[in-house]
Amino acid sequence: MDKETRETFWKAFASSPIIMMRLEGADGHAEPMSAQLDKNAHHAIWFYTKRDNRIAPGGPAMGQVMTRDHGVFACIKGALSEETDHSVREAHWNNAVEAWLPGGKTDPNVIMLRYDITDSEVWASDIGITGAFKMLTGKPIDREHAGTHELGAV
């Protein structure tokens, strides 16, 4: 994946860090998870949840991202596992997390999951001013103004 698409993805995801997660091969639907991002770790995403959550068992998983402004769409493949590093758990705990998990970070039912990314497909749909004008006036949008599509690890 080219550097520009990678940077576009992480910047957009940081401003709207919700991802729909589902374990591969599991019954049931994907669920929205609030990602805890580390600006220096573009290979992993973290989530707090409870031990009885449908993705808590971990394993191969798939996540879908659609940013708030609809500028970036992504399908991310990877593996979920419980994060056991106490310093990582502490670093990402915040008031928003505590609002969802009122038992607090010492609750034995609260876990942090680490999602190690192995592959991705990203669509960035920044059509720019020219593309927006053409869309508003009903004119065709040239391919070079329609955005990008990249495969590979984010």
Image (spheres, grey):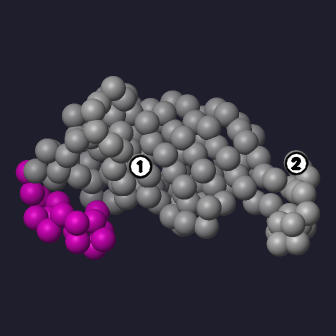
Q: Main secondary structure of the magenta part?
A: loop
Q: Amino acid at mark 2?
A: Arg
Percent across and percent down for residue 56 are 23, 40
Q: Nearer the viewer, residue 108 or 68?
A: 68
Percent across and percent down for residue 139 are 91, 63
Identify the residue position indicated by label 1 in the image.
Answer: 20
In space, the residues marked 2 and 1 are separated at their CA atoms by 29 Å
Label placed on residue 143 = 2
Where 118 sits versus 8, above or below? above
Residues tagged 2 and 1 counted as in contact (Cβ below 8 A): no
Instruction: Report the span colored magenta.
Output: 93-108
Quadrant holding the N terminus? top right
- Under circle 1, the secondary element is strand
Closer to us: mark 2 or mark 1? 2
Q: Is residue 107 magenta?
A: yes
Q: Residue at x 91, y 52 (%)?
A: 142
Specify whether 40 is left or right of 59. right
Where 100 sits versus 32, above or below? below
Where 39 sits versus 75, above or below? below
Q: Residue at x 51, y 64 (%)?
A: 16
Examine the image and state in which quarter residue 141 appears. Answer: bottom right
Specify whether 28 is left or right of 104. right
Q: Nearer the viewer, residue 142 or 24?
A: 142
